[in-house]
Image (cartoon, rainbow, N blue to C red):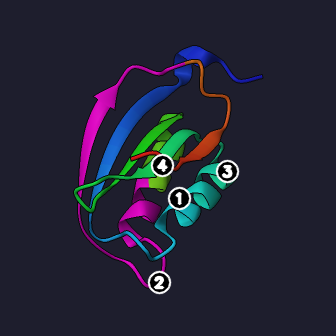
Amino acid sequence: MERSQNKIARTYTISGRVQGVGFRFFAERWANQLGVRGYVKNCADGTVEVYAIGDQDALQEFKRQLADGPRSAHVSRIDEREEDADTGYTAFLIDDRW
């Protein structure tokens, strides 16, 4: 059983060629493999936002994968912010809203 107090949360804002290249599906697949909860969404400014909740090791690996991105993407920058862990997220979702 996972202990919620070990969970941390981060928001990653990913810049570069990251929309229209399958980035959200890529992020969802890695999040599910690593046991990360939260969401990924495209933003109107051309970036992708990822809110991720997990343990330290999972989030480090997740960020590493986001930095690589899918094959047709080109990640130029990732900005990271510490966040409060929202216990309402029980899975990782693709958010289609702008």
Disc 3 crowd rating (10 Å Cα; few below 14, some 14-19, many 20+) is: few
Task: Single out the residue that lies furthest toward the bottom.
Answer: 72
Q: Quadrant of residue 78?
A: bottom left
Q: Are marks 4 and 1 in contact (CB under 8 Å)?
A: yes
Q: Which residue is mark 2?
A: 71
- Going from N to C along the chain, the mark reached first, 4 or 3, is 3
Q: Give the alpha-carbon distance from disc 2 to disc 3, as whole Å.
A: 19 Å
Q: Give the alpha-carbon distance from disc 2 to disc 1, as whole Å.
A: 13 Å
Say which residue appears at 60% left-offset and 27% top-offset.
89
Q: Amino acid at mark 2?
A: Arg
Q: Give the alpha-carbon distance from disc 4 to disc 2, as whole Å.
A: 18 Å
The circle on residue 40 is 4
Of tags 4 and 1, which is closer to the observer? 4
Is residue 64 part of the magenta span, yes or no? yes
- Going from N to C along the chain, the mark reached first, 2 or 1, is 1
Q: Give the alpha-carbon distance from disc 4 to disc 1, as whole Å.
A: 7 Å
Q: Mark 1: which secondary structure?
A: helix
Q: Which residue is mark 3?
A: 32
Q: Which residues are magenta?
A: 63-86
Q: Which residue is mark 1?
A: 27
Q: Amino acid at mark 1?
A: Ala
Q: Mark 3: which secondary structure?
A: helix
Q: Quadrant of the N terminus?
A: top right
67 and 25: which is toward the camera = 25
Q: Mark 2: which secondary structure?
A: loop
Disc 1 crowd rating (10 Å Cα; few below 14, some 14-19, many 20+) is: many
Q: Are marks 2 and 1 in contact (CB under 8 Å)?
A: no
2 and 74: which is toward the camera = 74
Disc 4 crowd rating (10 Å Cα; few below 14, some 14-19, many 20+) is: many
Q: Is residue 74 left or right of residue 4?
A: left
- Going from N to C along the chain, the mark reached first, 4 or 2, is 4
Say which residue appears at 48% left-offset and 54% top-offset.
61
